[in-house]
Amino acid sequence: LRIFIDKYLVEVFANDRQAIVGAHMDYQAAGGLHFYTYGDSTRIRQVDIWKMKATNQGFLEARENRIWAPETE
C-alpha cells in the first residue's frame, strides 16, 4: 500500500494500481494521520514517511532570477 499526500490531495495505491484519490481542503487544520478498516481487524506493521522536494522548485528559481529570458545583446 502506497499513500502520497501533497498538501490537500491524498492518493492511495494498492498492488501498484490506483485505488482512491481524495481531497482534504482543510489540510492546515489537520493534526495527524488516521487509518480505519471495514470488516476484520487490520494490523499496520510499518509506516515509512519521506519528505519529497517540490517539483516546481527549479521553475520558481528561474522565474525569480530570469535565467530563462533570451539575451538581448
Image (cartoon, rainbow, N blue to C red):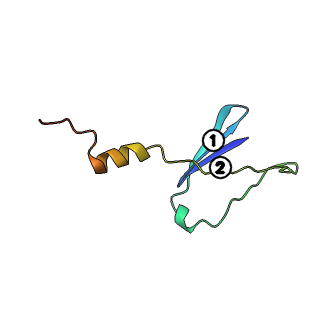
Q: Residue furthest left?
A: 73
Classed neighbour count for the residue bearing mark 2: other residues with Cα under 10 Å, few (<14), some (14–19), many (≥20):
few
Residue 29 appears at what percent x and percent y? 56, 68
Closer to the N terminus: mark 2 or mark 1?
1
Could you say which disc has been placed on residue 7 in the image? none
- The residue labelled by disc 2 is 50
Residue 50 appears at what percent x and percent y? 65, 49
* Nearer-the-camera pick, 13 or 49: 49
> Between marks 2 and 1, how big is the CA–CA gap?
20 Å
Is 16 placed left or right of 59 in the picture?
right
**Residue 34 picture quarter:** bottom right
Residue at screen point 54% across, 61% down:
27
From this view, report whether residue 28 is shown above or below residue 46. below
Residue at screen point 60% across, 65% down:
30
Q: Mark 2: which secondary structure?
A: loop
Locate the N terminus by quadrant.
Answer: top right
- The residue labelled by disc 1 is 20
The amino acid type found where label 2 is placed reads Trp
